Image (cartoon, helix red, strand yellow):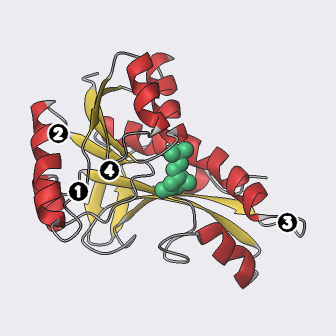
Amino acid sequence: MKKVKLGVLVSGRGSNLQTIIDNIENGNLAAEVAVVISDQADAYALERARKYDIAAVQLSAKGYRAKREEYDALLVGELRKYGVELVCLAGFMRIITPVLIKAYPNRVMNIHPALLPAFPGLHVQKAALEHGVKFSGCTVHFVDEGMDTGPIIIQAVVPVLDADTEDSLSGRILTQEHKIYSRAIQLYAEGRLKVEGRRVMIRDGKTSADEFLINP
Ligand code: GRF
């Protein structure tokens, strides 16, 4: 199978990037990380990329605070330079603009640590605990022009336990993030994702609900 060229955008530790790399290495993901781009020079994710001889680009956002479109145009330039076909946001702490989305329509994915549309934005595990929900989880979705609003590809559900802290809940969710992000990318690589309005259909085979029901 042809390998999908990924551009992974990061800002921090890069554990999702690491699992994507691991799944590629062990043959579970028909993809290649063509480039990792960070807006933060000290992102550990860049080091992870370098260890595997993956191009690691730091694109500082300094001076682009009010010029998000210009920053995204630079991003698009880098992504194209590396022949990127699918853009994966993995802890990228910037709001992206239509410049990136129009360059990669339905080809930008994001992982979010809550069951969207509940708890979009930041500090969502804390928000879930404070709200008192009994289940939370994570969502892989295509990115559109809103904040965490794009069509949902896969979700995984985890219970919220009485003893949970923000850390323990985040950890339980992160374990599932690592599973479903690679799974969503693999479905894309197999050409099995079909976007119909807000719904993402998975062609042939099991639906995501069969595989990712509830994870203790
Ligand atoms: C993850 O919780 C992801 O859902 C969110 O940012 C975090 C990134 O973690 N968007 P990592 O850098 O992949 O370890």
> Disc 4 designates what residue?
193
Query: Which amino acid type is shown beneath numbered disc 3?
Result: Leu
Q: CA distance from mark 4 to mark 1?
A: 10 Å
> Disc 2 designates what residue?
79
Q: Secondary structure at mark 1?
A: loop
Q: Secondary structure at mark 2?
A: helix
Q: CA distance from mark 2 to mark 1?
A: 15 Å
Q: Earlier in the sequence, mark 4 or mark 3?
A: 3
Tell me what residue is drawn at x 55 percent, y 78 percent: 118
Q: CA distance from mark 4 to mark 3?
A: 33 Å
Q: Which mark is residue 161?
A: 3
Tell me what residue is drawn at x 16 percent, y 30 percent: 82
Q: Earlier in the sequence, mark 4 or mark 1?
A: 1
The mark closer to the camera, 4 or 1, is 1
Query: Which amino acid type is shown beneath numbered disc 4?
Result: Leu
At which x and y percent is residue 175? 66, 45
Query: Which amino acid type is shown beneath numbered disc 1?
Result: Asn
Relative to 120, is 94 on the left or the right?
left
Given contact means CB atoms under 8 Å apart, are the residues at marks 2 and 1 in contact? no
Q: Secondary structure at mark 4?
A: strand
Q: Earlier in the sequence, mark 3 or mark 1?
A: 1
